[in-house]
Amino acid sequence: MKSLRKTELAVIGGGPAGLSSAITAMRQGAEVTLIDRDPVLGGQLIKQTHMFFGSKDQFASIRGIDIPSELIKALEEGPGKVKVELGTTVIGYYDDGVILMEKDNRATTLLPQRIIVATGAAEKMLPFPGNDLPGVYGAGAVQTLMNVYGIKPGKRVLMVGAGNIGLIVSYQLLQAGVEVVAIIEAAPHIGGYLVHASKVRRAGVPIYTSCSIKEAFGRESVEGAVICRLDENWQPLPGTEKTLELDVICLAVGLSPLTELLWQAGCKHKYVPELGGYVPVRNEKMQTSIPYIYVAGDAAGVEEASSAMIEGKLAGLFAAASLGYDHDLESLAATYRKELEELRSGEAGSKIRQGLAKLIGGVSVAS
């Protein structure tokens, strides 16, 4: 029987947060094992064709699909070595800190001294009659079809949700030659950045706020949908129904943090709707209620990919520091925290700030 493999730091998830964690910890001197269930690194970045905002350090004016290659290059050219486990799913956590992994139907174990969970988030679905018809997709599935495999999901699309994801995917659909019949949003205001909303409006796509989907219909797949207005209590207004002919309904109604491993490990969680639902309680070091487990990215609370990368840097920095690799710790931490504050500033970041105010400081952990 093979002896138990060991590593100083295991980073679970190879998306923007996980890659940033691994790079930062490696640069500090830590031995890192990066684990991802997909065959390639990058997570959701591999399907994001829009250009990023922020600063040069946050890949401003670079398309999401081009960012993974930059991060992988930093990983490969760094001063240390990161062991990458692709096509590998972490399926279990034991009380002694051992994690169980599966690859090619074979189970292996790994004992890390520290763990960073950067597993991202899953799409929320919306209950309505007909939501099980072929042609009802989550926005992530639509992005995967178009931007990874080059397949149009259909000809006429109703987008449900006017947050950043709904607006960005709508524009990507238009770029692919797909007609977006309308974007509907249950809230009284558009949730995404107005720059994204302006682009789709200029393309002739109407955005209806205080509006929701009542039902989808079709014999073997989606053939249409009925939408309606909502009152101030979010209830359907009788007589406002409108029928739309379409073959795709795309749901962009939010994300839920993927924290099953953290629940299994016994980390404390708190329900914070502004951050996507139940999230692990953690401090400003990205440290959970279990001192040797850290969290970053959407698993810590749903935000943008730019914030996820900076959170990943913080988690990697403090996880490495707890192992004794604390070179230039305070200066780097101050820089990353300032970048996060800038990303979360203004009206667009108010929801995130409200959520974090409920969460940060709610846990007592060892330094």
Image: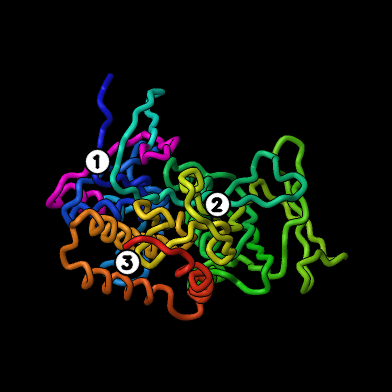
* Amino acid residing under circle 3: Ser
* Amino acid residing under circle 1: Thr
Compute the Cα span from label 1 to label 2. Answer: 36 Å
Vertically, is 79 above or below 99?
below
- Apparent side of residue 126 relative to residue 191 in the rendered image (left or right): right
Res 86 seen here = yes
Colour scheme of the picture: rainbow
* Amino acid residing under circle 2: Ala
Q: Quadrant of residue 35?
A: top left
Nearer the observer, 217 or 191: 191
Res 73 seen here = no
Query: Dot 1, how many residues are within 10 Å of its Cα: few (below 14), some (14-19), or many (20+)?
Result: some
Query: Dot 3, how many residues are within 10 Å of its Cα: few (below 14), some (14-19), or many (20+)?
Result: few
Q: Helix, strand or loop at disc 3?
A: loop
Q: Residue 305 at what x, y percent from top left?
A: 40, 60
| Camera-side mark, 3 or 1 | 1
Compute the Cα span from label 3 to label 1. Answer: 36 Å
- Apparent side of residue 58 relative to residue 194 in the rendered image (left or right): left
Q: Earlier in the sequence, mark 3 or mark 1?
A: 1
* Residue in the image at 19% along x and 50% along y: 30
Residue identified by numbered label 2 = 139
Q: Quadrant of residue 220?
A: top right
Give the mark count.
3
Residue identified by numbered label 3 = 61
Q: Which mark is residue 7?
A: 1
What is the magenta range?
A: 70-98
| Camera-side mark, 1 or 2 | 1
**Magenta stretch: residue 262 in it?**
no
Q: Quadrant of residue 189?
A: bottom right
Vertically, is 279 above or below 346?
above
Q: Earlier in the sequence, mark 1 or mark 2?
A: 1
Query: Dot 2, how many residues are within 10 Å of its Cα: few (below 14), some (14-19), or many (20+)?
Result: many
